[in-house]
Image: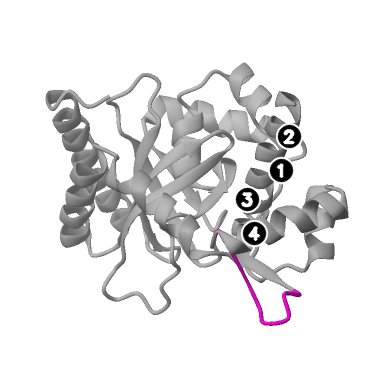
Amino acid sequence: MEPQLVKSAERTVRILEALAESHNHLTLSELQQRTGFPRSSLHALMRTLVELNWVETDSARSAFGIGPHALLTGTAYLDKDPALPFAQETLEDLRAEIGQTAHFARRDGAHVLYLATRESREADHVIPRVGRRLPAHVTALGQVLLAQLTDDEVVALLPEPLDGLTEHSITDLNKLTGELDQVRTRGWAYEREQGTPGLACVAVAVDYRIPATDAISCAMPARLGPSEVERITEAVIKHTRKLAATLRREGIR
């Protein structure tokens, strides 16, 4: 009986992850294609999730999306994170100094999970980030955190082949490990249009855990020149080091 309970729990989580990763509602057939679960068990699980408000559906129950109780769980995670209030204050200070969008994220396996964002007040198009999960290898946040690992650990962690989000994304594992060597040498990561067309990003790891799990980044227009990128990089380094010192002083691990 116990293995069946474990299987049901795993399938429930996989369903919620599939719905969360989709920009649109998914039909039962689309969910079956993405999860590979038998249609009979999938139908029963969806009915239960809808009744419990973890999944929402249209009036015909022909398509499904994430429900409100999933938001409650995610919010609870943020509310209980002891590092987050200090990180949010750092993002405020960083945005005030450089005027660009600042992010705080945590590595989640081969991805980075955005936990806090302060958008530039001059941003033409705001892309919601909090709660989003992106492949680590296409973001400066992810690259600076992957650089905390050995090359063997990175190779074991990442899928092959690497998927790209733009034409500038690194999709070759050897090229990525070479880039991570440079990140380790200089102490920060920089990517240009690897994750989002028109944007560049610089990131610094928050060194209060070993290896570091969190990082601060600044997103900026890709058109900015070297002197402005250098100014922003110095600001990110300064504020991130201050945050790490604060977290260590507060005993947060």
- CB atoms of marks 1 and 4 within 8 Å: no
Q: In which quarter of the image is residue 223?
A: bottom left
Q: For the C terminus, give its image quadrant.
A: top left
User: Is residue 55 found inside the magenta-colored segment of the image?
Assistant: yes
In magenta, the rendered stretch is 54-62
Which amino acid type is shown beneath numbered disc 4?
Leu
Pinpoint residue 50: horizontal percent, then vertical percent: 62, 63
Q: Name the residue under label 3.
A: 17
- CB atoms of marks 4 and 3 within 8 Å: yes
Measure how far apart labels 1 and 3 are at the Cα level: 10 Å
Which amino acid type is shown beneath numbered disc 2?
Lys
The 10 Å Cα crowd at callout 4, few under 14, some 14 to 19, many 20 or more, is some
Pinpoint residue 73: horizontal percent, then vertical percent: 43, 50
User: Is residue 21 found inside the magenta-colored segment of the image?
Assistant: no
- CB atoms of marks 2 and 1 within 8 Å: yes
Measure how far apart labels 2 and 1 are at the Cα level: 6 Å
Point 66% across, 71% down: residue? 24
Point 22% across, 59% down: residue? 95
- Frontmost residue, 169 versus 206: 206
- The earlier-in-sequence mark between 2 and 4 is 2
Which disc number belongs to residue 11? 1
Q: In this view, does 16 lie to the left or right of 207?
A: right
Q: Quadrant of residue 122?
A: bottom left
In this rendering, does residue 151 appear at all? yes
